[in-house]
Image (cartoon, rainbow, N blue to C red):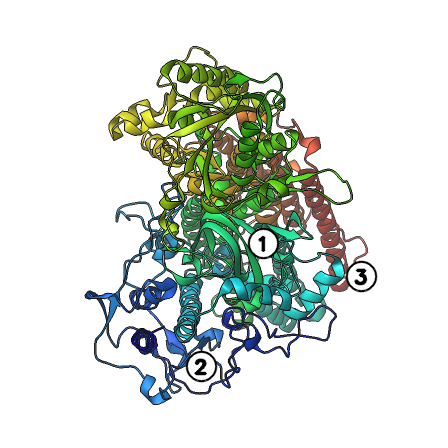
Amino acid sequence: MELAERLAWLWTIERIRKTIGLENKNQRQPTGSSLRSTVRFATEPTRARTTPCAPDTKSPTRNLFSPAQPRPSRVPRTQHVRVTETPSQSRRFDRAVGLVRSGQVTPASSDRDTIHHTSHGLELDSAATSTTSSPLAHHHDDYTLPAPRPAGKSPGELRRDSSPRTMPVGVQAPEASPGRYHRRRDDDDGNGSDCSDVLGVDVLDEGADPFDIPAKRASVERLRRWRQAALVLNASRRFRYTLDLKKEEEKEQIRRKIRAHAQVIRAALLFKEAGQKHDVDRELPGLANLLKTNTEKGVHGDEVDLACRANAFGANRYPRKKGRSFLVFLWEACQDLTLVILIIAAVISLVLGIATEGIKEGWYDGASIAFAVFLVILVTAVSDYKQSLQFQHLNEEKQNIQVEVIRGGRRIEVSIFDIVVGDVVALKIGDQVPADGVLVSGHSLAIDESSMTGESKIVVKDHKSPFLMGGCKVADGYGTMLVTAVGLNTEWGLLMASISEDNNEETPLQVRLNGVATFIGIVGLSVAAMVLIVLVARYFTGHTTNPDGSIQFVKGQTSVKSTIFGTIKILTIAVTIVVVAVPEGLPLAVTLTLAYSMQKMMADKALVRRLSACETMGSATTICSDKTGTLTLNQMTVVRSVVGGIKLKSPADIENLSPVVSSLILEGIAQNSSGSVFEPEDGSPIEITGSPTEKAILSWGVELHMKFAEEKSKSSIIHVSPFNSEKKRAGVAVIVDDSDIHVHWKGAAEIVLALCTNWLDVNGISHEMTPDKANQFKKYIEEMAEESLRCVAFAYRTLDLNYVPNEEERINWELPDNELALIGIVGMKDPCRPGVRNAVDLCKNAGVKVRMVTGDNLQTARAIALECGILTDSQASQPVIIEGKVFRAYSDAEREAVADQISVMGRSSPSDKLLLVKALKKKGNVVAVTGDGTNDAPALHEADIGLAMGIQGTEVAKESSDIIILDDNFASVVKVVRWGRSVYANIQKFIQFQLTVNVAALIINVVAAISSGNVPLNAVQLLWVNLIMDTLGALALATEPPTDQLMKRPPVGRKEPLVTNIMWRNLFIQAVFQVTVLLTLNFRGRDLLHLTQDTLDHANKVKNTFIFNTFVLCQVFNEFNSRKPYELNIFDGVSRNHLFLAVVSITVVLQITKDQLHLHLHLHLCDCACPSDQNYQL
């Protein structure tokens, strides 16, 4: 490198360092960073032990990089800085450092295009700065930023320069291929005040209902608004399963710090490369030898070898936040304001009772309230703790990504947590890079590093830029990488270990229930206040009597202790009414039913990534489904073939083909493929890996006696055009005999056929593609398509070596796809899944329209749709069955007009699917979309419910989805619809049950308080009722499994009232019945129970006990009524719901036990008070 260019690099790095304001103080050796894996190539593992497989830690870095040069005496140091960034400052920083990363800034860049950086680009907290000034202060972490210092610069010269600086802008990265994935990124608005750039943006109408939020991407302002409007007694419990807005802001700050870390490492690499040039092709074998691996066959893969590597280099895991213990949930349950008041009242009552009546009699009232409060807290904590464990298990399932690695020459899938240093990982479009590493080989490999750098640009990887960072996504192409660092030794590991993994979020239904709870709570507070005023007024005016008929308060005669004691009893009753009236458990019932549903959905092969998707799925009106792998088995086999212009008797019958045609078809199969064929040396069955289409074609090649490794060695790949859903074809250029260039193409038959100007006959002679011959090939394709076969064509052309660009220019080379010669066409059978027709019929009966959106041609799509029941008319025409390009050509208004009529869309691209989703949503549909490819991400993101495939789906598609279908089966999608409807139905059951309890308890206490000054249900009894109503009631009703009846109703409207007319009818009748019975017992109980001859005190106690038991048993029967709000037979299926029966049984048993304890306790107290009265009975 020339001196001027080297000085330009030094200047660039210095400007970056001044932009981020690094100071070289308190330097120490970097630990736990990918600097080890990139600059030093992981030759010095952090936890190296003396193990048989550990690399030689004494081997100096110079053996790998520059054998002729001595090892540098110093390496780039690290410096601890505390960074406080705003989003706008982070953008300036990302632009500054990002231009140098990936070589986008060059010394020859023009000075005309500049980016300005001021001293406000980044703020550094000094040692004297208060840690509380930063939103991250409570983390107490000094994040380590490596700070490479250019030669000849002292630390003092690297301080921030307050004057504006400029940085030249270089040539932009090459444009992505037409079908390449582009990251969807919410642009920061620059205010930096919240995390709206993370959560999304929506418009908030000032007059809108605060308890109405969108199912996706709700703004921070709307989330704050409903929290402020809610009436909450226990905020820590009510908001436990909602998004922590403060933590989201902190997590975003941490992400920016880690990204800064990664950026400076990039700058260090470029700085090092400015001084010396490396030949990665020569150095890679040295690295592989140090790691005792093979770049083609990978590690051995035996347990001992893997354990040694994990011990030496660490596991590909990071410390996770420990789940909260049971004691934490117990403490949070204690923070309910009303329960705190009751505990205080119980303590005061206990003290006054003992002081006035003695310990034998005075402890009862206070202790009974305290025990009831403790029981409520205990049951609440146990229920919440079990929910937490369920969510924790589901979060672990979400993070368990399957990765394809090469071990012992065999491609196998392993968990991302089982990746070790030295593994050779196979990457393809849509995959996540599982760890830090170095590129071994790749074709058009492009990486989206936005998750680490914050930049949305795609970075092309080759041997000039071979370093790969864990956590990034493959945006295009395919290749293999050598893992050099895992776990906390990677920037991704540091990032994941630094931020909380809680995925809590509020759902629309949960927020709506908070609104209902707030309304009921306000009514309850009003009633409690009224009861308090009435009771206090009656007490101090002398209208409240004791059980024996004496007046409780007489002015000037009643003692202060008795007055306080009486007032506390009144306050306790009022507070307890608040406990019962404010349905604190109503919004939490959503969490309970979601946790239960998510656990059961896992058994039904559906992994929920976003809670709100469960609810929204119950409102789905249409499902846009893929064909391959969802409606079909995704088990393709070649059953028809046309080669050399003739139909073969069997797909592998090539006896009549000339060697020229045979060699060309085998060369195209072997080289133009992202799959592989492994032939075990022990004679075991051949193993074929790749996508289902690749596996089918490779299997056909094996039937044609193809030796995969031998065929690959006959020619060398010089350039690849990977398959994508836009072009619907893939190409490869190979060099044969060091001079001949063959360009092979394969893809959608009619598309490849349209590119052909010639065709090869069985003798290998090329003929012109006349219109008649083209029509003959089209007829072959139509015949195969009518048999529901997927048609793939093979074509090739030769190319003069002079037309091939050199290696540096080849990265932007578009493979020529004109003047092709057709070699052959194959038809692959992919049978429909068993039961898919029944699933489609079930959706139709449920009012959910199923639409097929596929990349196959119209005839194949029509045949499959008829077989699945999506189409009933074989003669259906446009717009019922439509081609993607036709729909794409419509205007927005035309698309909206025909969207509802579409049942099948063939030859569609991901953009066509996105347009269809948007049109259907504008028509008022609630749209669910299935997808598996990287380019399906926009449609999955836009849909109301995105359903990614778990087997064939890429990581990009899964991250954009709301639910992952683990078995790729459409029947599982229908089960998700059932569970979504079940969630809504269960919440309605619980609402009906709880409102009935609320109405009955409030009316009877209010009427009794106003009429007599006493309430039949005291504080302890009301707390027990609250326990039945909130926790046990939710457990019984919110966990009802879905029934077939749910799929006979139309979809639930998203704006449909939570309490329907039928529910109001049931609630009114049940409440009137309960209130009538209880008030009758309250006012006429002595006569009905034949207690007129007993003392007034005894009669009232028996009457109130009878009222309490009647009220509780009414709620038990009300639970049965609430099971089936829309059906007459309320006992249907009750024997199958074991949890419901268990809860009801426990409620009844505890009620009887409580009465027995109450009876024995009163007998004991009465014996103590009246030991001489042997005939006293309670």
Residue 594 position within the rendered picture, expressed as x and y whole percent measured from the top left: 55, 44
Label placed on residue 1172 = 3
Above or below 475: residue 729: above
N-terminal label among 2 and 1? 2
The three-letter amino acid code for the residue at tag 3 is Ser
N-terminal label among 3 and 2? 2
Q: Label 1: how many residues lie within 10 Å, few (<14), some (14-19) or many (20+)?
A: many
Which numbered mark, 3 or 1, is in the foreground of this view?
A: 1
Displayed quadrant of residue 1035: top right
Q: Which residue, given by chain and number where applicable, does mark 1 sit on?
A: 425
The three-letter amino acid code for the residue at tag 2 is Gln
Label placed on residue 644 = none
Q: Which residue, given by chain and number where applicable, does mark 2 sit on?
A: 79
The three-letter amino acid code for the residue at tag 1 is Val
Name the quadrant of the N terminus: bottom left
Q: Label 2: how many residues lie within 10 Å, few (<14), some (14-19) or many (20+)?
A: many
Which numbered mark, 2 or 1, is in the foreground of this view?
A: 1
The alpha-carbon separation of the residues under discs 2 and 1 comes to 33 Å
Q: Is residue 98 left or right of residue 865?
A: left
Which numbered mark, 3 or 2, is in the foreground of this view?
A: 2
Can residue 1114 be seen? yes
Residue depicted at x 27% and y 62%: 170
Residue 735 position within the rendered picture, expressed as x and y whole percent measured from the top left: 48, 44
Question: Label 2's element?
Answer: strand
Q: Which one is in front, 652 or 405?
A: 652
Q: Which one is in front, 733 or 508?
A: 733
Q: Label 3: how many residues lie within 10 Å, few (<14), some (14-19) or many (20+)?
A: few
Question: Label 1's element?
Answer: strand
Residue 798 position within the rendered picture, expressed as x and y whole percent measured from the top left: 43, 36
Above or below 659: residue 469: below
